[in-house]
Amino acid sequence: MSDIHGQGAEGAGSQRPLDTFPRLLMHHAAVRPQRPAMREKEFGIWQTYTWAQVAENVRAIACGLAQLGFRRGDRLAIVGDNRPRLYWSVAACQCLGGIPVMMYQDAVAQEMVYVLQDAEIKFAIVEDQEQVDKLLEIAGEAPLLEHVVYDDPRGMRHYTQSLLMGLDELQEAGRIHDRNQSDFLDREIAKGASDDISVMLYTSGTTGKPKGVCQTHGAFIAAATGAIQFDKLTEQEDILSYLPMAWVGDHLFSFAQAMVAGFTINCPESAETVMIDLREIGPTYYFAPPRVFENLLTQVMIRMEDAGSLKRRIFHHFMDVARRCGADILDGKPVSGGDRFQYWLGKLLVYGPLKNVLGMSRIRVAYTAGAAIGPDLFRFYRSIGINLKQLYGQTETCAYVCLQPDGQIKLDSVGKPAPFVEVKLADNGEILVKGPMLLKAYYKRPDATAESINAEGYFMTGDAGFFDEDGHLKIIDRAKDVGKLADGSMFAPNYIENKLKFFQHIKEAVTFGAGKDFITAFINLDLEAVGNWAERRGMPYSGYTDLASQAAVYELIRDCVEKVNADLAPDPNMSGSQIKRFLILHKELDADDGELTRTRKVRRNFIAEKYAVLIEALFAGRQSQYIETQVTYEDGRTGKVAADLRIEEAKTFAPQAARKAA
Amino acid sequence: MKMNDMAAAGPAVAAGGRQIGEVVLDLQNISLRFGGVKALTDISFDVREHEIRSIIGPNGAGKSSMLNVINGVYHPQEGRILFRGEERRRMEPHMAATQGIARTFQNIALFKGMSVLDNIMTGRNLKMKCNLLQMALYWGAVQKEEIAHREKVEEIIDFLEIQSVRRTPVGQLPYGLQKRVELGRALAAEPTMLLLDEPMAGMNVEEKQDMCRFILDVNDQFGTTIVLIEHDMGVVMDISDRVVVLDYGKKIGDGAPDEVRNNEDVIRAYLGTSH
């Protein structure tokens, strides 16, 4: 592990290795004091803080905290939007050997209680009145809480609670303290070690209670150093920090990587202005979940529909060109001279201005992760010359396991194992990872820690996947959801369902097949998309149930299913997973009926039980099946929907590669 | 929620830390007629420094006329108006503005084609010292002055949380936001007294809550005296210090919200008993 430390910032001379974040910060303040470290838009103008200013402010906050009685190992809760002063608080806390615990700023008060209690929090630094109100509301349930420091004094004048304090006051007190005993903080920083816990990030808790993941300085520095080498990032990068600070991705991109490489992070004015701020900053390095990329594309498409017919034709012509050769040009693959010329023209007329509108003119590297990204979406951005890539990681691995290398982009893989990371597959297909970026422990949960790290030191991700012929990792599903067909070939329901859901006409899909001879699917229409489609062809329908039973709609969906089958066929691991029979459900799956979770994930087992007759009919080869289902309306009343569901067959394709022995 | 917190934070001092002071505006026996129509008859009430004073009443009770009298748009045939101890004789609306009185309108009166920023900037009109020629040349002190005004406007944008629409033409904004921009323009004049004519008309509950919070914040942070016309009784009773009730141009009640709520005449007027 020691070979990693200090790689991000060499030339520290005789000083100690740069193996903790406070040392990295002081290093940047010494070697590039005037480079911008952070920008924040305030009162409509971008304010810049240099590394020297950041270091000075962090020292002040740290000394202020120390005077309040903050001790080594104490946890500091940090709640708010991406504000420079909150990032400084993270660093200040680390200077004192404390552990910052970021919390989601949009969580309601009651959701915060758990973390406050679990992490035994005594100190909190929060953004504004809104967060203060929440903490005051639950202060009774978290009796350890002694100090709440707020950044923005607006609306706080009449709060008289003794545990409150303004960050300005705290910094002022800290500055005086730092002036009087300037070696105090240097001594504290010197006490830090690479394997001290640098941050605690809570898992989302979709399975059970959230767990505090303790990560060390060494882990995050290794993850950041590896990614920086991998993408050749420099101190010149600009990144927009707008994703929640409590999320591991933001901590890696906006804190750890910036601290190691010394580049600039930019904080948007408010959550609503992110798109405007993106354009003004023009980041060179960008991270966003697929949802954000999708929204941007939708906006562009809507505006194009409103444009004049000449503009529209130019746009569509050059988008066709881009689709044909854009991604290949980006990957440096051979492309004919004619196409090259057309692409060059397109860049002048369409792609360049479009990237400018999106705020992506300067992007060198962009990443997406967190959910499956649609193929059309992914191709769109790559074809107009934006180097969009995918990565894979968890909170427990500093969001750092696999990265897609430049020029080797595959839509459905997450790339190769990142530098310093070792990935292997367990017998059941579960992905196991090992490396310096692994968590130290779950906070106060030795049982959970022992469960998640096996005897050889591999972290068990709980995801199932496989390596393709080029050594790229493909994630297929949660390991516990992966089953086997009767002939022993793998059945990964989520993987197939995601492929189905990328079609705009399909909203939800549930596949079945574990222990059976073939795979079947329930389909839920996207009422808006299919409704529009029906209106354009003048097809009358009275509602969802009616639409779902029409032969033309079945035709439409069968087409989608067959496209998925064609897509699965060439893949030796997946060709057995083609969908043979399907039906369109007579009602929309709904969280009120218990069929989806509140985050809109399908509850597979519940659905299998509730619609057992339909599944039986699918596998028994019947042509139709009558069913009556109880539904819950929004006001809590219940009613019944009954329908005679049609069941159809879809074409399957012969595998091109040898299929696993049946 | 915030409103309750504020009240709870300092029950000893009215709705926060502000001190309600002397009478700043005293209206004595005001009568206003348009030809034979009596809009206001013999109305007297006063407004104290830093308070939130509401004027309520059924449709056509004379609320807006009252506001227009304060603002100098209408000139009452009878009665005296004392502003900061001085009697007003002849009065024009722009004089009210120079005296530190700003207002918003019942029907939004913004420049629809101009951005939010520019609309609020127009509120700085009276604070601009340079002459037209200097401004046209954009030379010397003008630049400095514009920067100073822009800073003030940005503070207001931040205060009203409308950063995301700073450059959007006002006509494209939803109604609730337009009302907020209008409040912003009034605030840009840095008034000591703010006249709000039905700031919450046509809003949904959430927009109303936001607007209430902004009104309370303006009153609390800038110490601005507020005269408010409003239909929504819930809002009026929650945020006002004192309430005047008008009906058919006559004053039928005056006092703290609780007193007014229990006043027989007020109840009758609102329940619509025949006259």
Image (cartoon, helix red, strand yellow):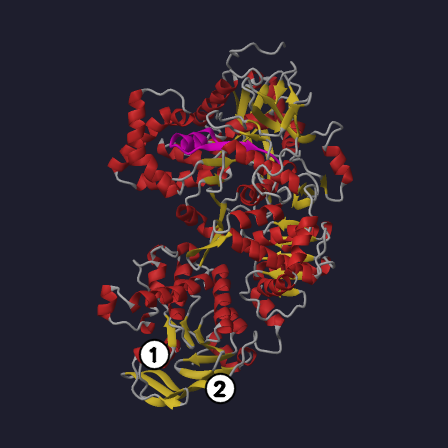
Total marks in image: 2
Q: Which mark is residue B79?
A: none
| Vertical placement of residue A615 versus B43, above or below | above
Parent chain of label 2: B
Left or right of B23 on screen, residue B138:
left
Question: Residue A401: image x %, image y %?
Answer: 60, 31
Question: Residue A93: image x %, image y %?
Answer: 65, 53
Residue at coordinates 74% horizontally, 37% vertically from top-left? A449
Left or right of A330 on screen, residue A449:
right
Parent chain of label 1: B
Asked whether residue B138 appears in the rendered view, the answer is yes
Circles 1, 2 touching at the beta carbon (< 8 Å): no
Q: Amino acid at mark 1?
A: Thr
Q: Residues within 10 Å of mark 1 (few under 14, many from 20)?
A: few
Q: Which mark is residue B98?
A: 1
Same chain letter for marks 1 and 2: yes
Q: Residues within 10 Å of mark 2 (few under 14, many from 20)?
A: few
Q: Nearer the viewer, mark 1 or mark 2?
A: 1
Secondary structure at badge 1 equals helix
Residue sticking out furthest to the right: A447
The quadrant holding residue B81 is bottom left
The residue carrying mark 2 is B22
Task: Tell me the magenta residue range.
Answer: A371-394
Whichever of callouts 1 and 2 sits on the residue coming sooner in the sequence is 2
Question: Residue B50: image x %, image y %?
Answer: 49, 79
Is residue A139 in the magenta section?
A: no
